[in-house]
């Protein structure tokens, strides 16, 4: 049934990716994602539904506004494609429908937060807070319907990962913000619900990737005091842990025992 999951995941991912393009551009600016309807940033023309079909419309119009002809950024179809890829990967890794929905949407949220953090250096509460409420409710419902999630491990992951990053933020407030604390707590809950040791993997990978990012930034000429947003590294660690956390944890334990 792999092909069925692929056929379902691709259009869902493209639609969610199209929504993310709106979320990324509006939430950081404090604007509503519901209204007004999408408009061309150059001429202000409202984009009709036929020009809002994910990926397809951008290709048909050759990346230009139908009204004024200005070139539309390629980031829009790229966000849609990446999100579709994340949905396909989630569908292949998590065949259970409840888990697929949780992981796929969570990956999309991590992707959106990463883009916003890179561009604006914030992790908006407008995204994080609803997620901190929505995922516990959703996963509790999933557990009632027999999905293989562990809510106790989720709570442990929430407290452990969020607590560790909170301590780091208190000790080094210039290197870590409260947005990182809240995101790490959310990651600990969702990843912990899937497999608790993967939370440690997510944290370890975030630190490693953050270190690599710092070295690359220095090599590119940025000073030591140039702050790098840590949200994308938290998101990347969580993403990798959701797919390979169990394998990495088992390999590590086998190596040290």
Image (cartoon, rainbow, N blue to C red):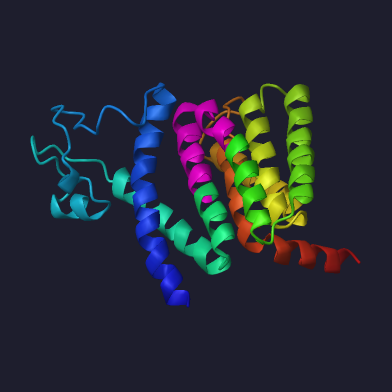
Q: Quadrant of the C terminus?
A: bottom right
Q: Nearer the viewer, residue 197 or 248?
A: 197
Tell me which residue sits at (24%, 32%) in the image. Answer: 37
| Residue occupying the far front of the picture | 144
Magenta-colored stretch includes residue 74: no
- Say above or below: 203 vs 94: above
Residue 197: give x, y in percent of width and height: 77, 55
Q: Is residue 31 above or below residue 83?
A: above
Residue 13 is left or right of residue 47, and the answer is right
Closer to the camera in the image, 237 or 109: 109
Q: Is residue 111 magenta?
A: yes
Q: Position of residue 156 (x, y in %)?
A: 79, 44
Label count reads 0
Q: Which residues are magenta?
A: 107-131
Residue 218: in sight, yes or no? no
Quadrant of the rendered structure where residue 29 is? Answer: top left
């Amino acid at each position: 049934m792999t092909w069925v999951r692929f056929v379902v995941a691709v259009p869902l991912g493209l639609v969610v990716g199209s929504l993310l393009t709106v979320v990324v551009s509006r939430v950081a600016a404090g604007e509503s994602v519901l209204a007004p309807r999408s408009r061309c940033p150059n001429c202000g023309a409202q984009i009709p539904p036929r020009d809002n079909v994910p990926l397809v419309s951008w290709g048909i119009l050759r990346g230009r506004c139908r009204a004024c002809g200005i070139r539309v950024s390629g980031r829009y179809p790229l966000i849609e494609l990446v999100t579709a890829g994340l949905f396909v990967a989630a569908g292949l890794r998590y065949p259970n429908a409840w888990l697929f929905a949780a992981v796929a949407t969570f990956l999309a949220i991590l992707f959106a937060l990463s883009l916003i953090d890179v561009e604006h250096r914030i992790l908006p509460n407008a995204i994080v807070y609803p997620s901190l409420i929505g995922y516990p409710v959703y996963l509790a419902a999933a557990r009632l319907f027999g999905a293989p999630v562990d809510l106790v491990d989720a709570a442990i992951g929430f407290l452990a990962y969020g607590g560790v990053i909170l301590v780091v933020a208190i000790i080094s407030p210039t290197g870590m913000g409260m947005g990182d604390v809240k995101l790490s707590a959310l990651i600990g809950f969702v990843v912990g619900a899937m497999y608790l040791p993967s939370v440690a993997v997510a944290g370890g990978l975030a630190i490693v990737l953050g270190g690599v990012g710092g070295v690359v930034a220095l090599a590119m000429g940025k000073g030591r005091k140039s702050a790098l947003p840590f949200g994308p590294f938290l998101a990347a660690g969580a993403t990798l842990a959701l797919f390979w956390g169990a394998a990495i944890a088992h390999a590590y334990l086998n190596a040290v025992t």
